[in-house]
Image (cartoon, coloured by chain):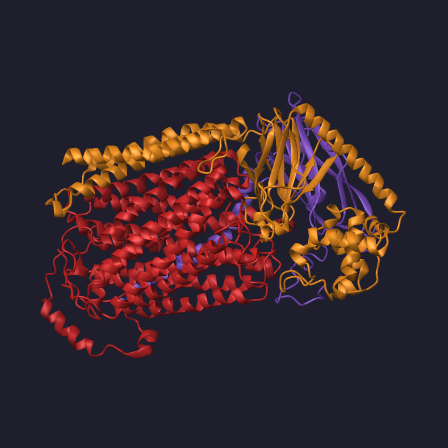
Amino acid sequence: MKQLGICVLKAWTALVLLVAGATAVAAGSGEVSALNLRRGATEISGQVYDLHMLMFSICVGIAVVVFGIMFVSMYLHRKSRGAKPANFHESVKVEIAWTVLPFLILIFMAVPAAKTLLAMEDTTEPDMTVLVTGSQWKWHYKYMDRDVEFYSLLATQREQIDNRYAKGENYLLEVDRPLVIPTGQKVRFLITSDDVIHSWWVPDFAVKKDANPGFINEAWTRVDEPGIYRGQCAELCGKDHGFMPVVVIAKEPAAYEAWASEQESIRQQAREEEQRLLAMNMSMEELMTEGERVYNATCAACHMPNGEGLPGVFPALKGSPMALNDMQGHIDIVLNGKTGTAMQAFGKMLSLKELAAVITYERNAWGNNTGDMVQAKDVNAVVSGE
Amino acid sequence: MSKATEIISPAHGEAHAHDDHHEHHIPKGLMRWVLTTNHKDIGTLYLWFAFIMFLVGGAMAMVIRAELFQPGLQIVEPNFFNQMTTVHGLIMVFGAVMPAFTGLANWLVPMMIGAPDMALPRMNNWSFWILPFAFTILLASLFVEGGGPAFGWTFYAPLSTTYSGDSTALFVFSVHIMGISSIMGAINVIVTIFNMRAPGMTWMKMPLFVWTWLITAFLLIAVMPVLAGAVTMVLTDKFFGTSFFDAAGGGDPVMFQHIFWFFGHPEVYIMILPAFGIISQIIPTFSRKRLFGYASMVYATTSIALLSFIVWAHHMFTTGMPVAAEMFFMFATMLISVPTGVKVFNWVATMWRGSMTFEVPMLFALAFIVLFTIGGLSGLMLAITPVDFQYHDTYFVVAHFHYVLVTGAVFSIMAAVYYWIPKWTGRMFDITLAKWHFWCSLISVNVLFFPMHFVGLAGMPRRIPDYALQFADFNKWISLGGFAFGLSQLIFLAVMIKACRKQGEPVSDQVWEGAEGLEWEIPSPAPYHTFETPPVVK
Amino acid sequence: MANSNSALVTKLLLIVVGMFGFGFALVPLYDVFCDITGINGKTNETAAVYYDGQVDESRTVTVEFITRTHTGMPWEFRAQTKKVKVHPGEMNMVEFYVRNPANKSMVAQAIPSVTPGQAALYLNKTECFCFNSQPLAAGGESLMPMRFYVDPQLPEDIHFFTVQYTLFDVTGNGTDDKPLNNPFLTSFSDN
């Protein structure tokens, strides 16, 4: 009978190790696993993965031993097998043993954990810095050593989320403008928020840091392999918390340089274009078409495509006093947001043309019909305080 | 039980006569329940309330799992989804688990220590009755314009202050009332245990369930007031212009997390220590062997309670803490696994070379030991800061806490009910149905929560209504497990209704062959008043 | 029996009340703890005093300045000097440009935050626009100085830290920045 018990124990151990091993193999192959953490693309993420596998193995080991003994006991020490209960009910030696042994196992775990932690938190000597700002519900990236900054929004079409179109391969993990960084360089991230707490997470870098409004946090990474790395916001931040992914493209330094210079010149051109626009007037038709596009992409999430908002949460624009009368206030609130509410400052995000168009659209759509046309120069006037 | 207890006096017959006399005076009808100060009645009220709340919170979980069954948004809007996750959490923590343990305390503590009732019976009535009031307010908040609370049961600022709707006021009010109920209940438990133990029932002769509830009660009075403070600060930041958590006014949103988790971490131990007590009563009975290491179990429970005060920031590793703090909290958290492990080893040592039978309470207790340990081991993994950066706010955490709370706390409550209900009703419950309940729950709960480890490790964040395609297959299985688990609880409902209607075979006083303790020395069903004359314990 | 019950109940109620107070006491305690350790990146909120001499020429520390405006704050706000290399113990001054483009006068509050947090303790500002709220008339602009020295006690391993100033709109001292749908405040026009 004891042999049977031991046999069962061996079979049990084998089964558990098989499962554990399969998990390890699935992950160690470098592919993104459905079962396990990934090794990732940096030295640190590799260390974190190894630490995770070590902890996991120890935990599996403990479980195997404890449950094994338990199952053996449930088999052998049954009344139906004729087992008679023993009398013992305490032993100081045993209590000490199974207090000290786990304590030693913990020390064995704590040493590599402490080492990896120290390595992760060393943000000194970065090669470049990116300021990451979270807001509801998008990320903003600003390169501190160059003239490049932009918003990064979810690019998955609404129709895919609403199940009208088939879902693409990177459903919910794609953005319009990913962050681009060079490989082989220590990139430092300064992380903050414009409204509530968000959290910037890229699993392949093992970087996750909260974005706290009014405060600044820092993290760093050095990516070994070029590639596309996808992550998500990791702190509940409101209704679209699940819809503000992080996408980072790591390029070889030369390719990164080329991209960065190109971005700088694109920005320069956009600025010049805006200056030219100030002298022009768009037609009502142009304003409404562009305005509708911008509205559906940017404003409809809260104010709804039909302009009716969400009572008690997001005000309606259809029939609102501001959209019907207060032109100055309307431009001001779209540009600058409203402190203490969820209404953000879209002046930072949209071009003068887009702002003019969307405000015109809001003043004329859904039966508002004010006939007002807002031009880029009108918006610019409010921006510069004339 | 620590040592065998023997009632020296009074004679059983005399006790019976007394009780027969009193049987005639048990109040009847609805007002009995509204006005009762009897610990048994109040225990029953708490348990039924907790069960109803469990089903309500469970229904919300069904909405969550229905939406997460497939990628895409099919059933609810994201804002409503967030309300479901928030209120599901609040109901399960404050409406199901805590009141259930309080109900068990009410029923069992006086009987286990040979006391006639709780120390403060009228406060006891209030402690219960303000709970349905509190939860009516919480559920009503879902219908306020703008929707109910949608910021998670952890209500971090400024999402809960500047960026929330009007329902936040109702949420705060409801939490205050729940807190008052818990505090009053805890005071009652402490005074009862301190002042009303039968002569001869020294500290180290108390049943483990009494010990764990005593320690839990101290945790409650220490930290529920801190929750009250946190929730009040959220209220004043939102409505009265304070800036506790608002950087513009000199405040700090991270400070909210420190205050909340200073409450929050001991809170999760409040939700598990009574479970440890229950298991420590059941395993010895069905192993026909005394609990191994009674003293050790008491010391381990005390250490867990004390340590629970110094680990709170392990919920905050990603907030931007300095390395020294991360190290401290990592080591302190890892340390808690030592006394917890000691308890598990002691249970197994109780089983070892016992003479086991596998009645339904024992089935749940054994499942608890295995599955709670799995939850505890994932907790140990979470304690390791560098890897926690990958686990934090993913489904790995959701898996961890559901293992310790569902297959941990909830299974222990089910075990307790199956164990003691024959004593309360005088009848054995429907064993066949109960076994169906056990096996359906056991299988479905693992289909529901085990794959969450995988999707969490694979990168799925928590509190999202929609997810990337690589998480779809496991989410489908998780949802199926969820629906099955929910349906399985209807079997439990059937067993309970039948039991309360006193359908089933009559049982003896001792009910279970290996059961020891004062509560097994009185008749089944337990008379309305018991131990009006205290027994003397040898 | 009732007497010993009351005594114990009283003691327990005192614990409850005490812990409620403790919850609120955590607020200043947190500030004190952060003041001592600087761990949340908050810096001194009142002017520091400068002690002459003590310049540590052997070390150079780079201080980086970042400026941001919070949602709802339309001002232009930038640091005239983005990075400065200083010796610990030496007085320095950097200027910050602000402009209020709105057509009404407004009041701003600048909130600093330092990373790494430990460095916050060692940034001693003797003059800072962040100590007070700053009013600016419609269309007005200003150059605000910030004078500071890095404490020579700065740990050896820190030779670079970042200071972020976030500018918040506090016009009306807080009543403006409360949510619209608030039944406890006098209602003002719904925009």
Vertically, is B401 above or below B50?
Answer: above
Q: Position of residue A72 (x, y in %)?
A: 20, 39
Q: Residue at x 24, y 77 (%)?
A: B26
For residue A333, what is the image quadrant? Answer: bottom right
Question: Where residue C21 appears, x then y in whole percent?
Answer: 47, 55
Q: How many dots with numbers?
A: 0
Left or right position of C99 against B450: right
At a point 88% along the width and 51% down the height, the residue shown is A281
Q: Work out which residue is located at the far top of the displayed protein and give it.
A: C58
Locate the N terminus of chain A by quadrant: top left
The chain whose colour is purple is C
**Which is more toward the observer, C69 or A267?**
A267
Q: Residue at x 12, y 74 (%)?
A: B17
Q: Where does residue B183 sit, x and y in percent of width and height?
A: 39, 60
Indicate the colour of chain A: orange
- Is residue B481 depicted above or below B43 in this figure? above
Which tint is chain B?
red
The answer to whether A31 appears left or right of B306 in the picture is right
On screen, residue C175 above or below B121: above
* Nearer to us in this view, A54 or C49: A54
Q: Residue at x 45, y 32 (%)?
A: A27
In-front residue for pair A177/A206: A177
The image quadrant of residue B499 is: bottom left
Residue C40 visible, this orientation: yes
Location of residue A4 in the rendering, given as x and y in whole percent from the top left corner? 17, 35
